[in-house]
Amino acid sequence: AERAKLAHSRGPGKTADGHPVKLLLNIGSAADLAPEAEGVGLFRTELLFLDRRTAPGFDEQVAAYAAVFKAVPDAIVRTLDAGTDKPLPFLELPVEPNPALGIRGLRVDRLRPDVLDTQLAAITEAARATGAEPAVMAPMVSTRQEATRFAERARAAGVRRVGVMIEVPAAALLAEAILAEVDFLSIGTNDLGQYTFAADRQHPALADLLDPWQPALLRLVETCAAAGLAAGKPVGVCGEAASDPRLAPVLVGLGVTSLSMSAVCVPAVREALAGHTLEECRAGARTALQRDHATIRP
Ligand code: PEP
Ligand code: MG
């Protein structure tokens, strides 16, 4: 048993019956890379530039991205995600009364298209310089049209794998249509929970609403995963939900194909998946969907 456990402590993620589930890393820079995982599922590029008053230049961005691509050529890079919890002063965005519902994520492109153009050019230059083939995805997409336009921009810049994050219920509901425009989806359960329950993700008194076991949230995950299975395209989870060893098998049972998390969480999730067959994961998913509450009660 000890030897079997050791065999599971590294290597690709899979269920007890061998169904593969990619275990990926959430990183903010090359410093967060770790050998535990199979790749990078979420490179939060805004963390490189938090609190900066001046815009990151092209060369600076190329260097930062190349440092990651050298180690992980197929990393999934997320374009800048400015938000309430992640201020990027160099964008000089107008002050808003309701910033979580305002100009954030991909919406910044409405005011500052130059920012995305520079970033996409820096990503493709870093990929060329390192021989890498990264994927690029946009945060806070809410319509099919936004996905289409982002995919056009990214492909025109030379990106070959384009995805979008599902963080807004409207996008989850249209997962099938959005997936027709892009190569993969990545579900950001932190924001998807916030927007599904109209509950500030940083509000300590609303933890029960933000619990990723909420059946309404899991239904949206199921909608996205089903669209992915139908289209034969990957649908991952990169929010905190992916790193809960009890929830991870449920997410797999709902049909998600990868789980992305910080390095310290990977071993426990790998072990949890190895302890359940795919059919058991599906049974767990059915049970979780049918509950009328999450694990935390107010
Ligand atoms: C999310 O919203 O779940 C996510 C992964 O993005 P972030 O936490 O960076 O907003
Ligand atoms: Mg998010």
Image (spheres, rainbow, N blue to C red):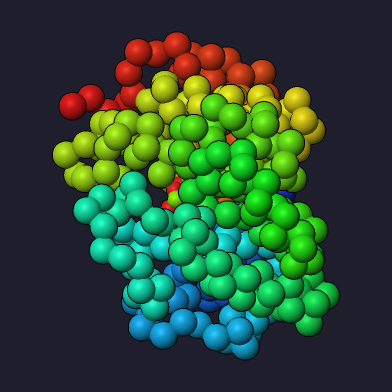
Question: Could you tell me which residue is drawn at 32 percent across and 31 percent down?
Answer: 197
Looking at the image, can residue 144 be seen? yes
Q: Is residue 247 left or right of residue 114?
A: left
In this rendered view, identify the residue nearer to me: 240 or 283: 240
Residue 240 locus on image (x, y percent): 44, 46
Quarter of the image where one finds residue 19 = top right
Q: Is residue 21 visible?
A: no
In the rendered image, residue 30, in percent from the top left (x then y), is placed at 57, 75
Residue sitting farthest toward the front: 111
Residue located 38% across and 25% down the image = 214
Which residue, as the protein is rendered here, is positioned at the far right?
Answer: 131
Q: Quadrant of the N terminus?
A: top right
Quadrant of res 233: top right
**Residue 78 versus residue 28 in the image, above or below:** above
Could you tell me which quadrant the C terminus lies in?
Answer: top left
Residue at the image point whose x is 67% and y is 29% from the top: 176
Q: In the picture shown, does residue 276 fall above or below 258?
A: above
Question: What's the residue at 39%, 78% (across, down)?
Answer: 90
Along the viewing direction, whichever of 288 and 236 lies nearer the viewer: 236
How many numbered markers are drawn? 0
Identify the image quadrant of residue 86.
bottom left
Q: Is residue 177 left or right of residue 285?
A: right
Residue 73 is left or right of residue 56, and the answer is right
- Give the percent coordinates (x, y) of residue 5: 63, 44
